[in-house]
Image (cartoon, grey):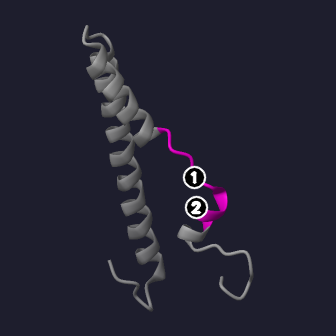
Amino acid sequence: MHAYFRNHQLYLAEKCNWMDRQVEKTSKRALMKIESYKLIAQAEDYEQTQLVKKLVQDSLFTSINNRVLLQKEGFYQSNLNN
């Protein structure tokens, strides 16, 4: 997927398609983690349930500062960096 000088529209379409696939894969992974947590939450073993609960919370419920997220995407506070 190269940024063609004369065909920006194709590049943007490919990039959008790639991003859609990444979002779909990420949402499927999150759904699988939630379903596995629900399955293990029904188990009798308390230690295993707590371990899985901690793993799910660490992987799915992490908070990210808005400024950090925007900087990773390429948006900066000053116009000189944009």
Occupied quadrant, residue 39? top left
Please name the amino acid that badge 1 sits on.
Ile
Q: In front: 54, or 75?
A: 54
Neighbours of disc 1 within 10 Å: few (<14), some (14-19), many (20+): few
Residue 64 magenta: yes
Residue 69 magenta: yes
Please name the amino acid that badge 2 sits on.
Leu
Which residue is identified by label 1? 64
Q: In front: 19, or 78?
A: 78
**Residue 3 x/y as whole percent:** 40, 84
Q: In front: 44, or 37?
A: 44
Residue at the image point whose x is 57% and y is 52% from the top = 64
**Residue 38 x/y as whole percent:** 34, 18
Instruction: Tell me the quadrant of the picture where the N terminus can be found.
Output: bottom left
Which residue is identified by label 2? 69
Occupied quadrant, residue 82? bottom right
Q: Tell me whether circle 1 and circle 2 mark residues in contact (CB < 8 Å).
A: yes
Tell me if 72 is positioned left or right of 20 in this view. right
**Residue 47 x/y as whole percent:** 29, 19
Tell me if 57 is positioned left or right of 32 in this view. right
Compute the Cα span from label 1 to label 2. 7 Å
Secondary structure of the residue carrying numbered label 1: loop
**Residue 80 x/y as whole percent:** 71, 88
- In magenta, the rendered stretch is 61-70
Residue at the image point whose x is 41% and y is 50% from the top = 23
Q: In the displayed orientation, state which residue is furthest to the bottom.
A: 5
